Amino acid sequence: MKTFSDNAGRTWTVTVNVDAVKRVKTLLGVNLLEAVDGKLLEQLIGDPVLLCDVIYAVCKPQADAQKVSDEDFGRAMAGDSIELATTALLEELCDFFPLGRRTLLRKALGKLRKLESMALATAGNRLDSPELEKRMQDALDEMNPDAVPSVAKTPGNSSGSLPDSSASIPVR
């Protein structure tokens, strides 16, 4: 049994057993046994609302005893509590299966976590890239053609459309 705390300070115990699997399937139409093929894991990790619904269904006997509605549970799930709940659910789900499937599920879970970590690192690198700022400035320049181009704002460049020298101004 794994535990996590929600943002209201309540501690929840996540237990995946046959009763919990049946309850999730009855309440949500989600078959936790499909986690072995990996698609359900991707769904749960990628959809925090579905994930919280599944966790609520797993924890429903506790919620009923504490008179915590689905809506109250959902209001207390954000940020780190979702991550802690995810870990609790996925570890319990792995432990539910017999050794062969458990090994396969842990491997799939490890791959998903590695992929998620790589995706976050890639996104962070892109956000830190000076190329992103250049693209953003170029897009702003395109949106506002009457503004002084960003090239003219760079030190050392000429300032706008003034003539190069007084020799090119016609005398009257």
Image: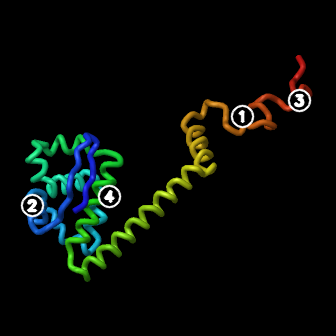
Mark 3 vs 2: CB contact within 8 A: no
Q: Which residue has dot 2 on it?
A: 23
Quadrant in which residue 35 is drawn: bottom left
Q: Secondary structure at mark 2?
A: helix
Q: Which residue has dot 1 on it?
A: 153
In the picture as drawn, the residue positioned furthest to the bottom comes out as: 100
Mark found first going from the N terminus, 1 or 3 = 1
Amino acid on which the number 4 mark rests in the picture: Gly
The mark lying in front, picked from 1 and 3, is 1
Query: What residue appears at the point 38 percent right and 70 percent down from the top-left corner?
Result: 110
**Left or right: residue 29 compared with residue 37:** left
Q: Secondary structure at mark 1?
A: helix
Cα–Cα gap, marks 3 and 2: 83 Å
Q: Residues within 10 Å of mark 1 (few under 14, many from 20)?
A: few
Query: What residue appears at the point 8 percent right and 47 percent down from the top-left corner?
Result: 65
Q: Which mark is residue 56?
A: none
Cα–Cα gap, marks 4 and 2: 22 Å
Cα–Cα gap, marks 1 and 2: 63 Å
Query: What residue appears at the point 26 percent right and 46 percent down from the top-left corner?
Result: 6
Query: What residue appears at the point 88 percent right and 16 percent down from the top-left corner?
Result: 172
Q: Residues within 10 Å of mark 4 (few under 14, many from 20)?
A: few
Cα–Cα gap, marks 3 and 4: 62 Å
Q: Residues within 10 Å of mark 3 (few under 14, many from 20)?
A: few
Mark 4 vs 2: CB contact within 8 A: no
Q: Which mark is residue 165?
A: 3
Quadrant in which residue 84 is drawn: bottom left
Q: Secondary structure at mark 4?
A: helix
**Left or right: residue 21 compared with residue 3:** left
Amino acid on which the number 3 mark rests in the picture: Ser
Amino acid on which the number 1 mark rests in the picture: Lys
Q: Position of residue 58 (x, y in %)?
A: 15, 58
Using the image as rendered, state which of residue 99 and residue 160 is in the foreground: 99
